[in-house]
Image (cartoon, helix red, strand yellow):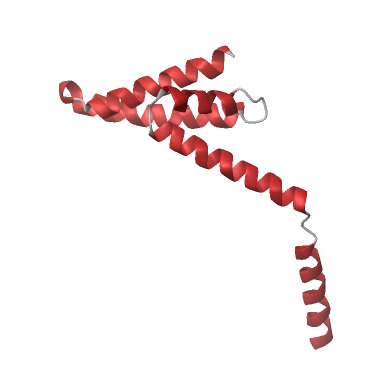
Amino acid sequence: MKAALILLLAIVSTAASAVDDETLSTQQQIGFMVQSLADAIDSPSPKSVEIIAHYGTNSRYYVMIRGWLVQELTGIESQLAAQGDNADPVLVNKAKHLKISLRRIDLE
């Protein structure tokens, strides 16, 4: 039993070290992309729209990014509807930003 556990541990450690640099690099690039998008979604500006458009027009990520934008917009629109005439200008600006970003990636 002890020998089987040692063998299993050796196999697992060998498999864990088999992650090559290319896979790690791809994972790091995706992580950077997600962090950049999160920052761009949270801070409305023309530069943020460009960042969203850069990643959102990539066919590999389009569906994920568009879905993220739609979910963010739905949440903000819900908050705006609840606030009525006393809507927070920051939320109004963020909703406009998300609509512009969605149009931008949909048209490209």
Counting from the top left corner in percent of width and height, residue 97 is at 39, 22
Q: Residue furthest bottom?
A: 2
Please give left or right for residue 14 compared with residue 85 in the image: right
Q: Nearer the viewer, residue 32 or 5?
A: 32
Q: Residue at x 50, y 35 (%)?
A: 37
Residue at 70% across, 51% down: 24
Quadrant of the rendered image containing residue 94:
top left
Task: Specify the quadrant that holds the N terminus.
Answer: bottom right
Q: Nearer the viewer, residue 10 or 97?
A: 97
Q: Which quadrant is the C terminus positioned in?
A: top right
Q: Choose between 19 and 80: the one closer to the eye.
A: 19
Q: Where is residue 4 shown, x and y percent of the image? A: 83, 81
Quarter of the rendering containing residue 46: top left
Total marks placed: 0
Residue 8's x, y, as percent? 80, 75
Tell me which corner region of the image, top left, top right, bottom left or bottom right, holds residue 61: top right
Residue 61 at least partly seen? yes
Residue at far front of view:
47
In the rendered view, tell whether residue 104 sits above or below residue 48. Answer: above
Outermost residue toward the top? 107
Residue at (46% x, 25% y) in the render: 47
Q: Is residue 1 visible?
A: no
Residue that appears at 27% across and 29% down? 90
As drawn, the residue found furthest toward the left would be 86
Q: Position of residue 87 (x, y in %)?
A: 20, 25
In this rendering, position of residue 6 left or right of residue 32? right
